Image (cartoon, rainbow, N blue to C red):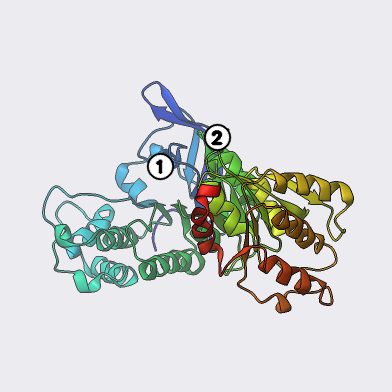
Amino acid sequence: MTGDRGDAGLVLEGVTAGYGGRPVLEGVSMEVRPGQVTGLIGPNGSGKTTLVRVAARGLRPRSGSVRVFGVDPYGVSARRAARLVAVVPQETTPAFSYSVLEMVLMGRSPYLSAWRSGNEEDWLHTRRAMEAANVQHLADRPLEELSGGERQRVLLAQALAQDAPALMLDEPTTHLDIRHVVEVLAVLSGLARRDGRAVLAIFHDLNLASAYCDRLYALSEGRIVSEGTPQSVITRELMWNVFGVEAEVSPAGAAGRPSVAVAPALPLAPRDDSPRAHVIGGAGRGAAVMRLLAEEGFDVSVGVLHVGDTDQVLAERLNLLRVTVPPFSPIDERSADDCRALMAGADVVVVCDAPFGPGNVDNLRLALDAARSGVRTILIDQVPIEERDFTGGEASRLWRSLRSNARSVSGPDEVLAGVHAGRGQI
């Protein structure tokens, strides 16, 4: 690999840049270290692509400085700057019909004179780059005949042939299937660790960014709002404050890094004339029913639940009316009265096949009282009560009594059918 070297890779200090009179980046400082893959994350319009353009000598900053291995790319010729930084754009459409081999060979243009078409070293770099990007079998194919994923890998090969110490990629996994995503990101990791290159990549997939990046920078409205390891950057707070979505962030996913699962959109708030439903759940057994009924337009209440229970967390997230008691505590009389009032005013009560122990068996007594008083009751009877009775048989006795006073269904998917079967009564 050729190019100027220094102790640092890519360094931006206090960079402000934009288009026309509008600044897109304001006071951005960051470092992309040699030997590491650094990820840039943030919502659309936050300035990620602009930052890459500034770093790659594509947009001169209004203030601040850029250094690539100790060299100001704006203070040297375009040819020398191209030996410092290689860029993989999201996609490009050439003006002429080039073959894949010709496109990749163009990556050697910073090293070619006007009268030289390439020597043995140039062909060696081109061949290695095509093999690394797995496009060697496409060498004679015209670029316009390739799929989006194949073109993306050709652009990567072109950048690799450029053999610059800094490599920047704008969404490198766009158009790629999962196998090629893994291949491309493995190539980037190898270039950083084996060759000591400074790699900066924009990611929209936060799980990929977490799994493959050594360091992350989060941009929002043109400013760095978080930086550090994936473990310190990817948090529930970041997902809400920067991306505006509720998400579960597991601290150690399959790759030993944080993993993100975005919660589905919340149901619309019920109308004043919406039918009422009360759900008795626990241990996550009521989650599907709560969301299903809420999405169907019901005004849903839940309880009694213990604080910290999976169903309690979802009910809070869905902003449902709920009755709760402290963890591991029995249902007190006041909470029982609150729950009794909710069930009495409900059009339908749904009792889920949750596990029952001394702390929540009173829920079955409350449901049985409601069913006997005439409240339409649906019983999800999927998991045998004997497998989830931790009361020495009391829960089983109450469940059998409920079964004779309620409509039984075999799972959450049948709840709506049970509700609609009695719609005339609701």
Answer with the quarter of the image where residue 57 lies: top left
CB of mark 2 within 8 Å of CB of mark 1? no
Residue type (three-letter) at the residue carrying disc 2: Arg
User: Looking at the picture, does residue 315 appear above or below residue 254?
Assistant: above
On residue 155, the disc is: none
In this rendering, the answer to whether 395 lies above or below 270 is below
Q: Please give left or right for residue 259 compared with residue 150 in the image.
A: right
Query: Which of the two labelled residues, at mark 2 and mark 1, occupies the earlier sequence position?
Result: 1
> Where does the N terminus fall, quadrant-wise?
bottom left
Residue 94's spot in the image, x, y percent? 17, 50
The kind of secondary structure element at disc 1 is: helix
Label 2 vs label 1, nearer the camera: 2
Q: Which mark is residue 271?
A: 2
Q: Is residue 10 visible in the rendered structure shown here?
A: no
Q: Residue at x 62, y 56 (%)?
A: 249
Residue at position x 83%, y 73% in the image: 391
Looking at the image, the residue that sits furthest to the top is 21
- Write down the residue under mark 1: 49
Q: Residues within 10 Å of mark 1 (few under 14, many from 20)?
A: some
Task: Estimate the spatial distance between the alpha carbons at disc 2 and disc 1, rounded to whole Å.
Answer: 43 Å
**Relative to 75, 111 lies left or right:** left
Residue at left offset 34%, top offset 70% = 132
In the rendered image, residue 248, in percent from the top left (x then y), is placed at: 61, 55
